[in-house]
Image: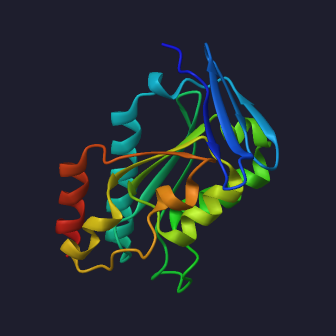
Amino acid sequence: MRRPAESRLDRTGGVLSIAVDVGRRVIRATGRRTVVSDSNFDDFDHESHMRRAFELAREATDRGDRPYGSVLVRDDTVVMVDSNRVLTEDDVRRHPELNLAYRACREFDPDERAGMAMYTSTEPCPMCAGGMRTAELGRVVYSVGGDELPDFGGNEPSVRSATILDGVTDVVGPVLNDEGRRIHHESD
């Protein structure tokens, strides 16, 4: 099904971003560049990719880290995976979402990144969302929302990822929320 053009205007009436779905090619124009993607995210195997992110979150917990795992997918094929290593590597930057965004920028061009979706066990924090915005990934799909983190002893982020990623990366979630919440409960 085709989507009509979607656009957002700034306060002066100028277009900040526009996305057009033309069959299987999505054209996204931001203030910086125009990106063309052949990916049809709706055809991706969302449950399989999210369950792989859950496996990575459990691996992080088994290693002594908090339960966060992420999978980067292009054309419905996993191209990169990572899990949280903040505690075991004593490095606050070792969130899987931020690391995958960094690696994607080094290994793929903007058009390729625009056709990628990141599946992550928990909604990206503001730091990770900033990295994903810079990487200009096409979509992020999460299971547990940032607003749910206080249920597991965490802090609710001051800014939600959708606000940071608006106009650049589509944000979808929660997906398989009960399974994602279970992983957080198991890690407490």
* 104 left or right of 87 in image: right
Position of residue 15 measured from the top left corner of the image (x, y, whole percent)? 72, 43
| Residue positioned 39% across, 45% down in the render | 52
Position of residue 82 measured from the top left corner of the image (x, y, whole percent)? 52, 58
* In-front residue for pair 96/133: 133
| Residue positioned 30% across, 43% down in the render | 175
* In-front residue for pair 169/113: 169
- 131 over 79 or under it: above or below: below
Q: How is the image coloured?
A: rainbow
* 36 left or right of 175 in image: right
| Residue positioned 57% across, 55% down in the render | 165
| Quadrant location, the C terminus | bottom left
* 184 left or right of 41 in image: left
Position of residue 67 measured from the top left corner of the image (x, y, whole percent)? 34, 67
* In-front residue for pair 182/140: 140
* 21 left or right of 152 in image: right
| Residue positioned 51% across, 60% down in the render | 163
- 20 over 182 or under it: above or below: above
Position of residue 85 measured from the top left corner of the image (x, y, whole percent)? 49, 73
Furthest residue toward bottom: 90
